[in-house]
Image: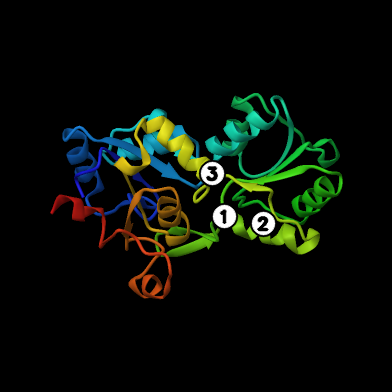
Amino acid sequence: MLQYTGYIFDLDGTIYLSNRLLGQADQVIDKLTRLGKKVLFLTNKPIETRLDYAKKLNNFGIPATIDNIINSSLVTAQYLSKQKSNAVVYVIGEPPLIQELESFGLQITADPLQAEFLVVSFDRTFDYDKLNDAMIALKNGARYFATNPDRTCPIDGGEIPDCAGMIGAIHGVTGIYPEVICGKPSPITLAVALERIQQDAKDCLMIGDRLETDIKMGIEQGLDTALVLTGITSKEILEKSSIKPTYILESVADFLL
């Protein structure tokens, strides 16, 4: 697995789980870096800023900056700003997403009737009022984007509901799904990643714990893939799935073998 020039790592369930480092990931990244490989971290999780992720990785002994970290907030903000600069956006999401959207010049509104776009994300404060506002925005003609399709987010000891919960609730009352979901497995995300890592898809390996996001994106976009069994996907789930990775790893520590 050391023949690639670029390595794109998921974070939760791959490099760490909550506050626990997985699979000697610090040693793995150090090895790849010493071999002259390009390393990028790519997560769908929008509830922390890229600076937060960089600090967390550095605390684990993994050198990182916002320049080699991409999350679905960044991808969504960049993509939406290209649709319409200075667009007015109603957000169902947490402050790190709003901060990223504002950094691209997008205008955040609390009035769903003013919204040109509705952006829906992983939101641990999602409630009836937000659901109602989303319905109003869509009935008023707002375009509908979402950050990521994940059903759950892995944490130490289990999982918590992710963005799909918000998407599902909105679909339940409107019958409408997002026009675009920007995070993995979308080619929108991979395009941002390849531009950042400055490598061709065929020269990169995508490493992650989710078949339907990490591995699916890699396969569909021409990357070899490595599934780690430290997160969401078990061997039993893998056996039943039609999505098959290039490599199956007990953890990223397999890079040290």
Is the residue marked by circle 2 packed among few (<14), some (14-19), or many (20+) residues within 10 Å?
A: many
Check the image and report above or below for 21 versus 227.
Answer: above
Image disc number at residue 46 = 3
Helix, strand or loop at label 3? It is loop
Residue that carries the numbered disc 1 in the rendered image: 149
Whole-angstrom CA distance, mark 3 to mark 1, is: 12 Å
Estimate the x, y position of residue 89 in percent, counting from the top left. 73, 35
**Of the image marks 3 and 2, the number of the one nearer the N terminus:** 3
Is the residue marked by circle 1 packed among few (<14), some (14-19), or many (20+) residues within 10 Å?
A: many
Check the image and report above or below for 60 versus 152.
Answer: above
Residue that carries the numbered disc 2 in the rendered image: 167
Estimate the x, y position of residue 239 in percent, counting from the top left. 36, 74
Q: Looking at the image, do the residues carrying marks 3 and 2 touch, with CB atoms under 8 Å apart?
A: no
Q: Looking at the image, do the residues carrying marks 3 and 1 touch, with CB atoms under 8 Å apart?
A: no
Helix, strand or loop at label 1? It is loop
Q: Residue at x 64, y 45 (%)?
A: 93
Q: Amino acid at mark 3?
A: Pro
Estimate the x, y position of residue 45 in percent, counting from the top left. 50, 47
Q: Looking at the image, do the residues carrying marks 1 and 2 touch, with CB atoms under 8 Å apart?
A: yes
Q: Amino acid at mark 1?
A: Pro
Q: Residue at x 53, y 44 (%)?
A: 46
Helix, strand or loop at label 2? It is helix
Is the residue marked by circle 3 packed among few (<14), some (14-19), or many (20+) residues within 10 Å?
A: many
Q: Amino acid at mark 2?
A: Ile
Horizontal arrangement in the rendering, residue 167 relative to residue 39 (left or right):
right
Whole-angstrom CA distance, mark 1 to mark 2, is: 8 Å
Residue 247, by quadrant, is bottom left
Horizontal arrangement in the rendering, residue 85 relative to residue 11 (left or right):
right
Q: Nearer the viewer, mark 3 or mark 1?
A: 1
